[in-house]
């Protein structure tokens, strides 16, 4: 197993979006946050030898990290063809990992674990919830990253989807200036990461 710090260093070297698309809310996932989430998932037994999906994989940081941490198989799904190209370049030489140019909401396969960083909903309100609902219905364990200010709403939404939150972690998430309307080089926002299992009926 890679240490959390070693994984963060590996992930920090990956290329991010060359031409980010605002309507898709394309922001690079911070390597330190990604490494911490993946390390937590590994320690809880949700990565090693598991079939894993990454919904809205972007340039592949969570998918690649899961593969490096010993997943049996990782599938990253992304609707942006440009991002898929970057993800494939980042993943060169990493086995048991493939990226698909596909809307994750149309994916019907079931996985052991889904790890995702969906759009936060800054451009389209509640844009994160369709992927969250789909993930809960397609894996017994889900890790999902969201804006912390939406925590109360998301907890109730997850409950209604038949999910149960077992763990929640908060992070300071750096959003680097990516678009012309950004006035700060880096803006830090608080995010929350939920570990969700299907509630027993």
Image (cartoon, rainbow, N blue to C red):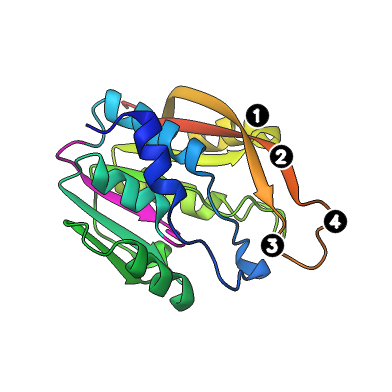
Quarter of the image where one finds residue 178: bottom right
Q: Tell me whether the residue at label 1 lies in contact with that at label 3, contact meaning CB atoms closer than 8 angstroms.
A: no
Label 3: few (<14), some (14–19) or many (≥20) C-alpha neighbours in 10 Å: some
Q: Which mark is residue 46?
A: none
85 in the magenta segment: no
Q: Is residue 197 visible?
A: no
Residue matched to label 1: 152
Q: Secondary structure at mark 2?
A: strand
Expressed as whole percent of the image width and height from the top left, the position of residue 80 reads: 48, 73
Q: Secondary structure at mark 4?
A: loop
How much space separates mark 1 and mark 3, taking CA atoms?
29 Å
Residue matched to label 3: 178
Identify the mark nearer the N-term, 4 or 2. 4
User: How many numbered marks appear?
Assistant: 4
Q: Nearer the viewer, mark 1 or mark 3?
A: 3
Q: Which mark is residue 183?
A: 4
55 in the magenta segment: yes
Determine whether, in the image, residue 129 is placed left or right of residue 64.
right
Determine whether, in the image, residue 14 is placed left or right of residue 147.
left
Q: Nearer the viewer, mark 1 or mark 2?
A: 2
Residue matched to label 2: 188
Q: Is residue 78 visible?
A: yes
Which residue is found at the position 48% from the left and 53% from the top? 131
Q: Nearer the viewer, mark 1 or mark 4?
A: 4
Magenta residues (range)? 48-59
Expressed as whole percent of the image width and height from the top left, the position of residue 201 reads: 32, 27
Which residue is found at the position 83% from the left and 64% from the top? 181
Which residue is found at the position 47% from the left and 76% from the top? 82
Classify 180 as above or below 158: below
Expressed as whole percent of the image width and height from the top left, the position of residue 68 reads: 25, 45
Identify the mark nearer the N-term, 4 or 3. 3
Label 2: few (<14), some (14–19) or many (≥20) C-alpha neighbours in 10 Å: few
């Amino acid at each position: 197993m890679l240490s959390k710090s070693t994984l963060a260093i590996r992930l920090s070297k990956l290329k991010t979006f060359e031409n980010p698309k605002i309507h898709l809310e394309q922001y690079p996932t911070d390597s330190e946050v990604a490494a911490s989430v993946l390390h937590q998932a590994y320690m809880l037994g949700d990565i090693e030898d598991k079939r894993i999906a990454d919904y809205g994989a972007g340039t592949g940081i969570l998918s690649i990290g899961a593969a490096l941490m010993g997943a049996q198989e990782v599938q990253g799904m992304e609707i942006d063809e440009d991002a898929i190209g970057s993800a494939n370049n980042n993943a060169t030489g990493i086995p048991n990992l493939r990226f698909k140019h596909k809307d994750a909401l149309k994916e019907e396969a079931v996985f052991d674990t889904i790890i995702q960083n969906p759009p936060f909903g800054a451009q389209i309100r509640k844009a994160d919830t369709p992927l969250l609902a789909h993930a809960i219905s397609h894996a017994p364990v889900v890790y999902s990253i969201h804006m912390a200010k939406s925590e109360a709403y998301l907890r109730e939404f997850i409950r209604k989807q038949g999910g149960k939150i077992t763990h929640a972690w908060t992070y300071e998430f750096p959003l680097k200036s990516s678009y012309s309307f950004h006035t700060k080089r880096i803006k830090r926002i608080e995010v929350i990461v939920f570990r969700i299992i299907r509630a027993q009926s």
